[in-house]
Amino acid sequence: MKNIFLRFLFAGLSFMVLTRCGEEVLEIENPNAITLDRFFRNTTQFNSALNTVYAALQFQSISGAGLQFEMLQGDEAATEFFYNRQIVHANLSFGDASEQVIGKWSQLYIGIYRANQVLFALETNPDVFDDIEERDQVEAQARFLRAFFYFQVAHDYNGAVLRTDPRLEADVSAPFLSIEEITNQIILPDLIFAKANLPEFWPDNQVGRATWGTATSMLGKVYLYQEDWAQAASEFREVIDSGIYSLAPDNLDNFSHLTENNSESILETAYSAELNPGAPGGQVDDTQFITGAEASALARDVGQLRFGGFNTLLPTYYMHELFIRDAVDSNNPINDGNLQSKRMGASIAPLNADGLYYLTAPSLQNGWGFGQTAYVKKHTNWYFLPNEDGNSRSGINFRHIRLADVFLMYAEAVLEANGDVDTAIDFIDRVRTRAGVITLRQYIDDTGEFPEFHKSITVRNNAETTVAPSIESVMTHLRRVERPLELFAEGHRWKDLVRWGIAGDVLNELAQDEAWRLEIERLENLDPPQSNELNLIAGGVGPLFIRGRVRPDFQQASVNYNPSNKDYFPLPANEVQTNDQLNN
């Protein structure tokens, strides 16, 4: 059910017309404008304003099409060289004027500004609420959302400018704080308050609001990023033991408009393809003159070309191989004749995919050439439409936090905290069981070891290697295999690689595998051919079936990667130009 956030009543509180030029700020008083001292006179107005804070989650750089740029950074996804806006992220050549670099900063701070308006009004209008619990719940929601936005700023830009006063002139210019400073000064206090004051459940007509479980899960994630392993494990365990959440029956339930706000969902952004039907997907409500689309543009961007999409996001050969080797457990009752895992079926479409893809069998469709071995299914409408919407409108909610992620973060936390290998395997295997694949425990019980799936067997005639369970081997599996498989294209990957400090190693390893394929391609294109290992011209060889050419996903990224300037986005050029406390 689409909730009230999709019809926010207070689109874009506009208190001042603000113009920046160097150090000058021009304020123009509009006698007809809704201002802080004229609004927030009753609880209805407070809730209307709170709805606009939730509405900021809909911005495309936060939950929609803009996330594709970040999904291209790392080992999960790639794009074609002719997509100029996307390739700068795939190649790690983005700069301070790149679209997502500027757009995400701006849109996150719109969300922060809206949250600050609500919080400031609560301080200056203390007598509006007769019910203290209701007042605290409004504050808790605003503080949770502000913490969420600041977490994104901090871990995308390696820190943040702290702004808490909605009277714009107060902090147009403000210093840049480190991740640690912004976390301790704003993110943790906001989340701790939210956890203490949010309910476990909302009424049915309020589903989608932040809850106790949302705040607790986010708090655990913040501690995890701080490497406070024991505290992170404690927060995650509270969520797990609460009994509020359970894994959805099928992976696809997390990426379908038919099963939104399900038992696995902890935080998701609501979208609708029905509301405001004339507005193109991605049109946002950041001024009082524009009606937001309420729809996401992500599906059309990443959907397949032949079905009305733009095909800007492609699974890397590394990801494709991980999915292929995610072997189905024939004894798991979740499987019903499928030859590939349930999470593969919800995530990517290779040439030999199970079932239908945009309502037809892949074997009856064109595609899977030009080095494109698989297409992205996740976030697209492949499961019920023959084509993506021509106006870039999709109603699939974007899930920011779900229980499977909490399970995997908990596994990481207990491994790091006390080396609890058995508990880590247990929670990894809960996720694997839902996917319908052979669990790590099954492999271990059979041979005493489990496969090192992150080591390719499709290059250099490599044989599969196995390893005994240990803190190191299970952590490697969690980082290199389980999280990318379960959370493919959900926006977590680059942040994970950066916080683990392995981004450069991963890119270099995959660039070496790619270099081998590129050399085979060169040999096959000689006259006469000097190799046939990939059989590119005649249709490829299994399990990947690379056809036509080898797509070079990692050569440039591995060269461009430098942790000092590529782990995080640079500060946007326009922020540096208008904030005179930066670079001082």
Image (cartoon, grey):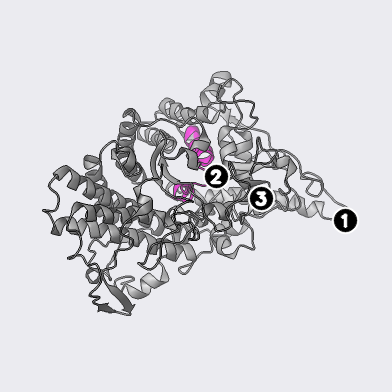
> What residue is pinned by disc 1?
527
Residue drawn at (35%, 67%), measured in percent from left and top? 288
Q: Amino acid at mark 3?
A: Glu
Q: Say which residue label 3 marks.
A: 514
Mark 1 secondary-structure assignment: loop
In primary-sequence order, the first of circles 2 and 3 is 2
- Seen at 56% across and 39% down, the residue is 346
Dot 2, how many residues are within 10 Å of its Cα: few (below 14), some (14-19), or many (20+)? Answer: many
Q: Is residue 384 visible?
A: yes
Q: Gap between marks 2 and 1, in whole Å?
A: 41 Å
Dot 3, how many residues are within 10 Å of its Cα: few (below 14), some (14-19), or many (20+)? many
Taking 575 as reference, is 441 above or below it?
above
**Amino acid type at mark 2:** Lys
Q: Position of residue 333 (x, y in %)?
A: 56, 21
The range drawn in magenta is 473-498
Instruction: Tell me the residue that label 2 is attached to.
Output: 378
Residue drawn at x 22%, y 40% as measured from the top left: 196
As for residue 408 lying within the magenta part, the answer is: no
Locate residue 404, reporting x and y percent. Answer: 44, 35
The x and y percentages for residue 560 are 55, 61
User: Are the residues flagged by discs 2 and 3 in contact, CB closer than 8 Å?
Assistant: no
Is residue 180 in view?
no
Mark 1 → mark 3, Cα distance in angstroms: 22 Å
Specify whether residue 478 is painted magenta.
Answer: yes
Give the number of the mark in front: 2 or 3.
Answer: 2
